Amino acid sequence: MTFVKALAWIARHIYFQFPSPATAPSQIIGVLVTILVPVMAVSVVMTLKWRIRYQRARRDLMYKAVERMASGPTVAIVVVNETECGAVEEAFAARAPGLIPKPGKAGAKAVTLLGTHGGARIVLAQSEQGTVGAGSMPWTVDNLIKHLDPAFLVLTGVCYGLNAHDLDGGDQRLGDVVVATQLCAVDHRKLTTRPDGSQYEINRGPRTEATSNLLSHARTLGRHRIPKVHFGHMLSLNTLVNSREERARLQALNEEAVAGEMEAAGLYAAAEQAKCDWILVKGISDWGIQKTDDHQSRAARHAADFVADLIAQIDPGAAASPH
């Protein structure tokens, strides 16, 4: 019997051509073996395949965790328009001469890397305006949190003041900085009619406070600062306000509100879902009436300077150190 003939004999009998004599139980066992052997072989192959895939995924996660630890914590700064983006880049470049912003990614979102400040890696992201639609604030923040795991988020840029020196007899001037102690989302509301036919509004949007430890650092930094830093309630709604009537309505809706803007409610929604710390810092560029772009650059830069100094004061890199 040659080796080739032996293989032929095995192959012939593995396909149910049993040698004679063969009992019924032995034929059944032969059939089962014929079926089970390939099934077991496939199972072993699939198990090994999934095991290798699992080990690779675990290794990649470990490498990413090590990279994050090695690079220190991340602080994500979010803006909406090009003026605000330029103001942040200029503020950090002023504190790190020679800084060259570099492009990067957070998942599908393009970001700008601004080097290290306060022991943290600074990442700047520009969102589309408002809180609805592709690329808007919730989608932007969700990508930042999932792919960068930031120590905290900062929303900065410009806003409209609601306590103007000339219009309202308040103490706000163009270029001043506003830090939100409480965010009031006012898009979610109920309009109803009284028995006498008059209409009134009930706000149903969330009211939430900025992260307390970030706010405490901001209060300390804001004392005696020029331009002045105001703390108070910030209104957030998906409406570009350029109307005296709408401004008056918002003031009546929340008498404690000091300013208003369009994106903070989206940042809060995404940050709250992920339990990520956040703070809102914006510069007053107008009063919600007769809008112009004349004061946007100055207001955005004042807010960005405050954000840069705030991060340096918090020093998230030192806070994250095991020492």
Image (cartoon, grey):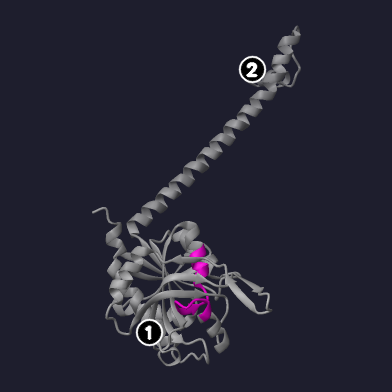
Instruction: Indicate whether 85 appears above or below 274.
Output: below
Residue 284: % across, % down: 43, 84
Instruction: Indicate whether 278 appears above or below 323.
Output: below
Give the crowd class for mark 2: few <14, some 14-19, many >=20 residues within 10 Å: few
Residue 77: % across, % down: 42, 70
Q: At x 69% / y 24%, what residue is drawn? A: 35
Q: At x 66% / y 73%, what residue is drawn? A: 192
Instruction: Judge left or right: residue 310 versus residue 284.
Output: left
The nearer-to-camera label among 2 and 1 is 1
- Which badge, 2 or 1, comes first in the chain's sequence? 2
| 250 drawn magenta | no
What amino acid is found at the position of numbered circle 1 in the picture?
Asp
| 256 drawn magenta | yes
Q: Is residue 296 visible?
A: yes
- Residue 176: which numbered mark, if any? 1
Q: Give the extent of the magenta segment.
A: 252-269
**Residue lying furthest front in this view?**
196
Quadrant of the snapshot with the N terminus: top right
Instruction: Indicate whether 208 appears above or below 53.
Output: below
Q: At x 50% / y 78%, what residue is drawn? A: 261
Q: Which residue is identified by label 2?
A: 2
Q: At x 33% / y 59%, what residue is drawn? A: 72
Residue 291: % across, % down: 52, 90
Of residues 146 and 280, the one nearer the viewer is: 280
